[in-house]
Amino acid sequence: MVEHHVANVDVAGSNPVSRSDKLKTMLRSPRGIFYLKKSSACNSETIKELGAFHRPVNLTTGFNFLRGGKEGRLGWSGQMNNRSDENQQMISRQLKRRKIETPSVLNAFTKIQRHHFVPEEFQDEAYGDFPLSIGAGQTISQPFIIALMMQTLALEKTDEVLEIGTGSGYSTALLASIVHWVDSLEFYQNLLDAAQKRLEHLNLTNYKLWHWNGWTGPPIEKQYDAIIVWASPNRIPEPLVKSLKNNGRMIMPIGKNDQKLMLIKNGKNGITQQFIDWVRFVPLIDGEPL
């Protein structure tokens, strides 16, 4: 289980740059989530939650880590530049220190560099220990949470996986580097198109992206060894449970505010649930895909 450290932090400084540096220092702590105090030097809407949990945030203290809507454009330069040193540092500090030990998961993170999936305006923060906005109110998740969920699923090379929430395509690429096949569903067409362009540059062929509502299960009649969900419904969608093979497993957050990360298994004794940790994700959206 993840140990979350909660601290009150006054981010007021003599100027926006100093406040930004302080925020970046605090967010790069290897432990958990921080709550920020309001102060006279911060606007009234200053962020209260940052760090390990998945929630788009607008910082009004002079530096934006997370921006949504029009500011969160999915820009990508098309240049597959190598930042392996930063990537390895992220793996060492953010994953291995938190007991991410599964070789296939670590190898995938080594192979797939996060900055290729981060909007251009956030390239300086691409290897930060926090989620980043990708537009449409969605985020590219904190690396540790991605790794934790994949490790908890105990993925095998022969597995076929259903992913709910393609997002930037980062987790899709990681999954495709671990398992035999990935069907990935995305609610937003613009996110799906941008993810497809990124993935095409990685020479991965064992995945398919679908413009689809994840609440309804896969767009084809198929069952999966594993299902991974990157957004939080208020209950477990029954179509997803029915999409699990015998001995299949699914990991997903559940809830609105206080969300539980749950491991769901379809075993010989039926469906079982196991609590993993407290998390914060964006909501799983139902309805006609946009």
Image (cartoon, helix red, strand yellow):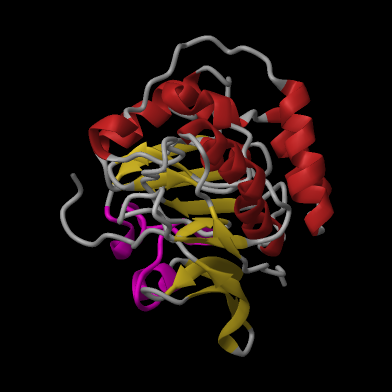
Residue at the image point whose x is 42% and y is 60% from the top: 38
Front-most of residues 150 and 248: 150
Q: Is residue 136 left or right of residue 195?
A: left
Front-most of residues 136 and 102: 136
- Quarter occupied by residue 171: top right
Q: Position of residue 101 (x, y in %)?
A: 83, 53
Furthest toward the bottom, the residue is 269
Q: Is residue 185 left or right of residue 22?
A: left
Residue at the image point whose x is 66% and y is 68% from the top: 4
- Quarter occupied by residue 232: bottom left
Residue at the image point whose x is 47% and y is 23% from the top: 198
Q: Quadrant of the N terminus?
A: bottom right
Q: Is residue 113 left or right of residue 245?
A: right
Instruction: Please tell me whether residue 245 belongs to the stretch shown in magenta.
Output: no
Front-most of residues 139 and 238: 139
Residue at the image point whose x is 41% and y is 55% from the top: 47
Front-most of residues 223 and 19: 19
> Which region shows up in magenta?
213-242
Q: Is residue 82 above or below residue 42?
A: above
